[in-house]
């Protein structure tokens, strides 16, 4: 993976919202998360000379989403890992192929809000 990049857009998005008595519902989220438009790196961080595993990655993200009638916008950094391939053995849960988390101050509607982004994908 070394010296490569993670870039792209995620548009098949889901969100959760409370529907009462501690129960949450899953709902579609419109818009997209753009990853690595300005900065993306896999492996060692040449900006800080920090040695990292070849399976780690970092990239910027930008969101422009519509969730439950409100616009959500944020920008920040994702820190992630490549953690393996799907296991096709019966009785075993599939492994995630990529995970990342990031958060930053953004807006929910017109109000400031901390926006957290969690990305995962499997092959």
Image (cartoon, rainbow, N blue to C red):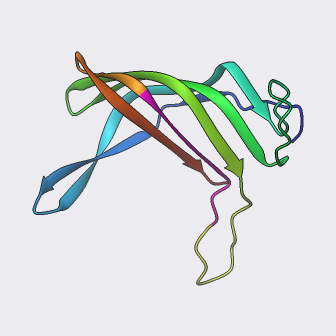
Residue 37, compared with residue 57, is above or below; it is: above
Question: Which x, y percent locates residue 97?
Answer: 68, 54
Question: Which x, y percent locates residue 93?
Answer: 58, 73
Q: Which quadrant of the figure has residue 27?
A: top left
Question: Which x, y percent locates residue 114?
Answer: 35, 31
Q: Residue at x 10, y 63 (%)?
A: 21
Q: Residue at x 68, y 73 (%)?
A: 88
Q: Which quadrant of the figure has residue 40?
A: top right
The residue at the far bottom in this view is: 91
Q: Residue at x 70, y 71 (%)?
A: 87
Q: Nearer the viewer, residue 95 or 3?
A: 3
Residue 74, compared with residue 103, is above or below; it is: above
Segment tinted magenta in the rendering: 95-104
Q: Is residue 100 magenta?
A: yes
The residue at the far left in this view is: 20
Q: Nearer the viewer, residue 26 or 112?
A: 112
Residue 63 appears in view: no
Is 17 placed left or right of 121 in the picture? left
Q: Nearer the viewer, residue 13 or 73?
A: 73
Q: Is residue 28 magenta?
A: no
Q: Quadrant of the C terminus?
A: bottom right
Q: Quadrant of the N terminus?
A: top right
Residue 30, compared with residue 64, is above or below; it is: below
Residue 49 appears in view: yes
Question: Which x, y percent locates residue 112?
Answer: 28, 21
Is 5 placed left or right of 110 in the picture? right
């Amino acid at each position: 993976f070394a010296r490569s990049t993670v870039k792209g857009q995620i548009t098949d998005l889901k969100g959760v919202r409370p529907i009462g008595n501690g129960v949450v519902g899953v709902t579609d989220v419109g818009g997209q998360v753009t990853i690595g438009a300005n900065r993306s790196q896999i492996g060692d961080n040449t900006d800080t000379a920090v040695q990292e595993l070849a399976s780690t990655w970092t990239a910027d993200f930008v969101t422009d989403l519509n969730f439950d009638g409100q616009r959500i916008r944020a920008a920040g950094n994702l820190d992630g890992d490549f953690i393996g391939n799907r296991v096709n053995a019966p009785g075993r849960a599939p492994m995630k192929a990529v995970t990342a988390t990031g958060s930053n101050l953004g807006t929910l509607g017109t109000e400031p809000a901390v926006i957290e982004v969690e990305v995962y994908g499997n092959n």
